[in-house]
Image (tube, rainbow, N blue to C red):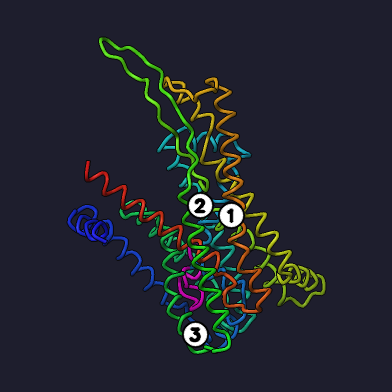
Amino acid sequence: MDNFIHKIKVIFGDRDLRKRILFVIFALFVFRVLAAIPIPGIDSTKLAAFLSNNQFFGILNVFSGGGLSKLSIIMLGVGPYITSSIIMQLLTIMIPKLKEMYSEEGEIGRKKFTQYSRLITVPLAAIQGFGLMVLLNKSGVLGTLTTFSMVTNLIVVIAGSMLLMWLGELMSEYGIGNGVSLIIFAGIVSAIPKEVSQLMFTFDASQIPLYIAFIVAAIIVIAGVVVVTEAERPIPVTYAKRVRGAKMYGGVSTYIPLRINQAGVIPIIFALSILLFPQMIANFLATSSKHILLSISHLLTGFLNTTWLYSLVYFILVFLFTYFYTAVTFDPHALSVNLQKNGAFIPGIRPGDSTEAYIAKVVSRITFVGAAFLGLVAVLPLVVRALTGITAIAIGGTALLIVVSVVLDLIKKVDAQLSMREY
């Protein structure tokens, strides 16, 4: 407790750190204000009925930071930006120049890479915005939209998505933590009071054992997320002795800490983004009058409503994206070359290709554990919903994982800033 109070004093006693935290708070306040501004022409009654039992829009609402539940001007949220980032990451596998730009050109290359992601965000926001507008219009939520109203609303939601993307990048640059993750985090946390009030309103004394079981499960999941996120696999490294002038350097033994879950919460977000597309297509085709399109809609809906099949696909996507993101962000070859250049080696392993193969083998093994854990946490609420029939926790595991991961990352960033100021 004393350590916590000391950190608070240091944070608000340091001018630069205080400005960073206050900027994040201000940006989140602006975000919540934007989420409360609706687009014109909404039928509130039909909107509430439309969103009441729709799991797809519940998940999409997580990405919009709660903006979709009110059809705000930021109803698309950071979803298009996340999707564009996924596309760019996938393209690094197929286009070697993009991989060189991202991995080898340093800060300038990453800035170019990010700029391409921003450019792709605009057409993606237009496609997603148009699909949602047409679906909501056919459902009667937006009444009867004229062409002018459709274009106007589409421009507004695209601009809102780009504004939110810009706000997230400002938070990353001038604040603390990842801005996009903080926006999703704020949207999830902002829904907690409403969920608690609904739970209190529908409280049933006969369900107390079930409530206790959910609380215990949540505590176990939170503890598991913290343990797996913080867990490391150390690789011992020894620096060879070198003589420079009259001094001898090296001869020191240390280790390289490899995180079991290096991808963090990104695979969950990637997997959800991919799963949103068939759900959006199914909802869009359900309003068609053509038999073939209705058959496709029923096929997709049947897949999405089959809990075990949906959970299996969700688990596989999370598992694969964990390996994929780890492969993109962690390069065993570059680490092996850096060790060799600095006169370091892993005891019992030859420098060069053997070191690279050893590091890749270790990373592959620990990533398997992290990927399996992320996949289980992601599908656990879906399995519990199938067993208990309670739909309110359909996105609980994903939301909980995002919240815990973002909080842990934020704490680490604050501790890093404090450490820099102490030195």
Element carrying mark 2: helix
- Spatial CA distance of label 1 from label 3 is 30 Å
Mark nearer the N terminus (2 vs 3): 3
Q: Are marks 1 and 2 in contact (CB under 8 Å)?
A: yes
**Nearer the viewer's eye, disc 2 or disc 3?**
2
User: To which residue does mark 3 refer?
Assistant: 198
Q: In this view, does 101 lie to the left or right of 394?
A: left
Q: Can residue 29 be seen in this view?
A: yes
Whether residue 411 appears in magenta in the rendering, the answer is no
User: To which residue does mark 1 refer?
Assistant: 373
Which residue is located at x 67 percent, y 54 percent? 316
Which residue is located at x 41 percent, y 56 percent? 408
Q: Give the range drawn in magenta.
A: 65-78
- Reply above or below: 410 against 348: below
Residue 337 rendering spot, x and y as whole percentages: 49, 24
- Reply above or below: 111 against 313: above
Hey, what amino acid is under mark 2? Answer: Val
